[in-house]
Amino acid sequence: MKPLQINFDPFPELTTERLRLRFLDMEDGADYFEIRSDERVMKHLARPQAQTVEDAIAVIKRVHDSIQKNTGICWAVCLKDDPKIIGTIGFYRSQLEHYRTEIGYEMRPEFWGKGIMSEAMRAVLDYVFHELNFHSVEANIDPINKKSSGILERNHFLKEAHFRENYYFNGKFTDSAIYSLLKSRHIAMTGQL
């Protein structure tokens, strides 16, 4: 098999019953800063917490670069009736030769526990498996983040590994949990061919 070829031009906007997953624009910088500067959001992400709007814009620029290079993609998650971003979801660290990619996501705390990220994830997984033809999707999370593991499990991911103190961030070693979802399992569990 040849390595996957992916192309995000034109940008693939996705919709669900309640959500619009759209391009994360530079004009979203102030709203994205609210997400990336929130301690509750960043607690389990092992990424630097944004200190300024410019920090958030720098992340958006990296997202744009990966989209342009066709190496990864990130959607702004919005309610259908409101363009303000309430979260992001996307994939990166794609291993095209192995037909595998890694998913990541974040959301404003006031929207936690409402099934919104699970709904966004279903749309992204359908796109990744059916439009791009990836074979598997991986998620690397903080194992104490039960909200995140719950989202993955509701979307039929299986826990594959728990690595003890394998990640160093902010002056301490933390654990990682690896979850994955095969295309065949996604199809079997969702009934979508």
Image (spheres, grey):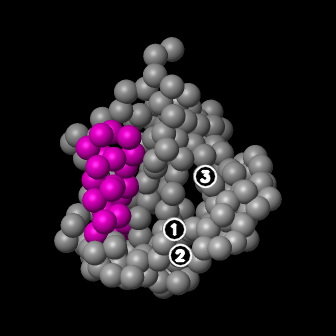
Q: CA distance from mark 2 to mark 3?
A: 16 Å
Is 83 on the left or on the right of 126, as rendered? left
On residue 47, the disc is 1
Q: Assess whether residue 36 is covered by the magenta stretch.
A: no
Identify the residue at horizontal 53%, vertical 76% (top origin). 42
Marks 2,1: beta carbons within 8 A: yes
- Which class describes the residues within 10 Å of circle 1: few (<14), some (14-19), or many (20+)? few
Identify the residue at horizontal 75%, vertical 46% (top origin). 160
Name the outermost residue toward the front: 171
Q: Quadrant of residue 34?
A: bottom left
Q: Which residues are magenta?
A: 57-81
- The residue that label 2 is drawn on is 42
Q: Quadrant of residue 43?
A: bottom right
Q: Assess whether residue 73 is covered by the magenta stretch.
A: yes
Q: Looking at the image, tell me whether mark 2 or mark 1 is earlier in sequence order.
A: 2
Q: Looking at the image, tell me whether mark 3 or mark 1 is earlier in sequence order.
A: 1
Label 2: element kind: helix
Identify the residue at horizontal 33%, vertical 47% (top origin). 66
Name which residue type carries label 1.
Arg
| In front of the other: 64 or 74 | 64
Identify the residue at horizontal 72%, vertical 66% (top origin). 174
| In front of the other: 19 or 169 | 169
Q: CA distance from mark 2 to mark 1?
A: 7 Å
Name which residue type carries label 2.
Met
